[in-house]
């Protein structure tokens, strides 16, 4: 009798595992379908550890430390003006805080494939939620940008070049056509996961509050950033950035309600 009970429990356990696996697979397919429905291809970043931060350079990028992350999805391209225009047309009416800087300059026929810029953190967060996603954490962003081999830039350790990224422009360039390139223009500048424009074009908001000393006390597994703060982090350099700011370890911050001209959006999603 006892043997039969054990066998039955084992069979039930295997059935539960089988059902759970099927549900997880179906959830992943649902995420991918939803991403395609919103017109943005997402890249799957596998679970595991990577080295975050820098062993030298600016204090706020130190110390270098190992971080484990669960698997996640991230947009392969920065959010474009065309995608953001749909968001504004649906829920942005009468909400000036959601309207980017220089939005009146946007000609969707000519600029629809360029990244949206000049958005607040609050608007970036609202957009990602609207498409059923979220902003990436700072750790997720950095792993997606530099991979597992500790490279300085998304493309590797070679110094930035204008064939790899859009950077080093005059701050007087304030129009979409003058400042930005269509997303995905720099094939040689992709990250190890095949993600475009993680250095240059526009910087990108992440979910975390900013704390210069957070790396010294960051959890080793799936860090979410400080519980509270004053400013939010953005990453990745932009069309006005110097070479130094193009490093995948570089961190900058701003108030969440402020519209930084050169800051845009890239969304993420949990991998179930």
Image (cartoon, rainbow, N blue to C red):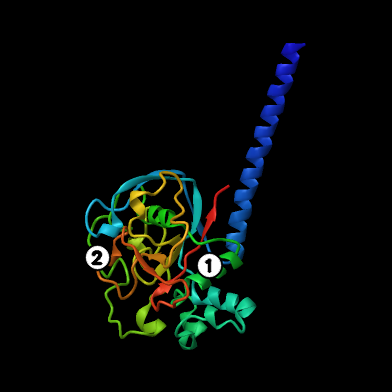
Q: x, y (%) of residue 6?
A: 70, 17
Question: Left of 234 or right of it: where is 54?
Answer: left
Q: Viewer-proximal residue, 222 or 8?
A: 222
**Vertically, is 2 above or below 192?**
above
- Using the rendered view, name the quadrant where residue 184 is placed: bottom left
- SS class, disc 2: helix
Q: Nearer the viewer, mark 2 or mark 1?
A: 1
Q: Which residue is mark 1?
A: 125
Question: Considering the image in quadrants, where does the N terminus appear?
Answer: top right
Task: State the separation of the CA atoms marked 2 and 1.
Answer: 27 Å
Q: Residue furthest right?
A: 1
- SS class, disc 1: helix
Q: Please give the name of the residue rendered at 63% of the width and 39% of the height, measured from the top-left corner.
A: 21
- Few, some or many residues within 10 Å of mark 2 (<14, 14–19, 20+): few
Q: Are marks 2 and 1 in contact (CB under 8 Å)?
A: no
- Few, some or many residues within 10 Å of mark 1 (<14, 14–19, 20+): many
Regarding residue 184, the answer to whether it shows in the image is no
Q: Please give the name of the residue rendered at 46% of the width and 71% of the height, measured from the top-left corner.
A: 256
Q: x, y (%) of residue 52?
A: 34, 50
Question: Left of 238 or right of it: where is 105?
Answer: right
Q: x, y (%) of residue 225?
A: 44, 55
Q: Which residue is mark 2?
A: 244
- Using the rendered view, name the quadrant where residue 19 is placed: top right
């Amino acid at each position: 009798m006892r043997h039969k009970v054990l066998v039955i429990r084992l069979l039930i356990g295997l059935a539960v595992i089988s059902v759970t696996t099927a549900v997880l697979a179906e959830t992943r397919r649902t995420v991918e379908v939803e991403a395609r429905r919103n017109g943005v291809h997402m890249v799957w970043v596998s679970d595991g550890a990577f080295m975050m931060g820098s062993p030298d350079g600016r204090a706020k990028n130190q110390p270098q430390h190992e971080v484990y992350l669960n698997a996640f999805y991230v947009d392969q391209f920065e959010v474009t003006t065309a995608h953001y225009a749909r968001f504004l047309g649906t829920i942005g009416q009468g909400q000036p805080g959601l309207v980017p800087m220089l939005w009146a300059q946007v000609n969707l026929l000519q600029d629809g494939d360029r990244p949206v810029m000049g958005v607040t953190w609050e608007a970036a967060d609202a957009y990602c939620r609207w498409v059923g996603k979220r902003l990436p954490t700072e750790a997720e962003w950095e792993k997606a940008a530099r991979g597992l081999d500790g490279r300085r830039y998304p493309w590797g350790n070679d110094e930035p070049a204008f064939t790899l990224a859009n950077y080093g422009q005059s701050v007087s360039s304030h129009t979409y056509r003058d400042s930005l390139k269509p997303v995905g223009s720099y094939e040689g500048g992709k990250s190890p996961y095949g993600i475009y424009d993680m250095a240059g074009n526009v910087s990108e908001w992440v979910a975390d509050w900013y704390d210069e000393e957070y790396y010294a006390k960051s959890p080793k597994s799936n860090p979410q950033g400080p519980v509270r703060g004053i400013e939010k982090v953005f990453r990745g350099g932009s069309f006005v950035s110097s070479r130094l700011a193009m490093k995948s370890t570089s961190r900058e911050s701003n108030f969440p309600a402020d519209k930084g001209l050169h800051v845009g959006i890239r969304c993420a999603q949990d991998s179930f």
